[in-house]
Amino acid sequence: MLCLLGGGPVEAGVTETPRYLIKTTGQAVTLRCSTVSKHSGVSWYQQALSQDPHLLFEFYENVQRAKGEIPNRFSAQQLRDYRSELNVSVLELMDSALYLCASSVAQPCRITSVLCTNLLVLSLIVREHAGSIWFHFFRGSI
């Protein structure tokens, strides 16, 4: 069993849903990010334990501008209503990481850009527990 747990509300300029999810290994998961300030750029990052964040996807005005070196199990899209979705088709233990959604005001950005605001941290921790896999999904802002 995989358990995705969402944290409480924060004063971030982006929001995520669902807050709670239970999955089993091999299943799919969708992380959703909405910009409350209607920013036209959205980026998704993955940060494994003790590693620097690396880019998964970058969108600007509903067009994918960049994609990191990631497995084909990962996909993402930016929707017309300022929402974005990150999908993992088959969950694996190696997907344990922090997942970050960032919105930008005027252009596609990298995590170090001054135009990147409202960074949302989505923590997806996978671990084995008595033959089961637990996902912990926390939310907070940086």
Image: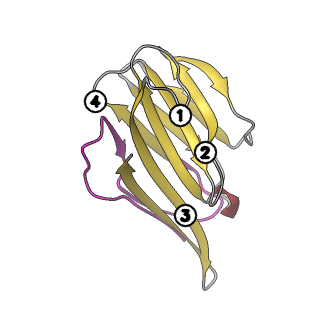
Q: Residues within 10 Å of mark 2 (few under 14, many from 20)?
A: some
What residue is shown with label 2?
A: 53
Residue sitting nearer the eye, 63 or 23: 63
Please give the range of residues in magenta: 1-29
Residue 19, magenta (yes or no): yes
Instruction: Report the disc number at residue 36.
Output: 4
The answer to which image quadrant residue 105 occupies is top left
| Marks 4,3: beta carbons within 8 A | no
**Residue pictured at 57% horizontal, 33% vertical:** 76
What residue is shown with label 1?
A: 111
Residue sitting nearer the eye, 106 or 132: 106
Q: Amino acid at mark 3?
A: Ile
Mark 1 or mark 4: name the one nearer the start of the chain: 4
Task: Say if 133 sits above or below 22 in the image.
Answer: below
Task: Say if 14 sits above or below 53 in the image.
Answer: above
**Mark 3 and mark 1: span between their CA atoms?**
21 Å
What residue is shown with label 3?
A: 125
Mark 2 or mark 3: name the one nearer the start of the chain: 2
Element at label 1: loop
Of badges 2 and 3, the one in the foreground is 2
Q: Amino acid at mark 2?
A: Pro
| Marks 1,4: beta carbons within 8 A | no
Task: Say if 6 sits above or below 120 in the image.
Answer: below
**Residue pictured at 39% horizontal, 46% vertical:** 142
Mark 4 or mark 3: name the one nearer the start of the chain: 4
**Mark 2 and mark 1: span between their CA atoms?**
8 Å
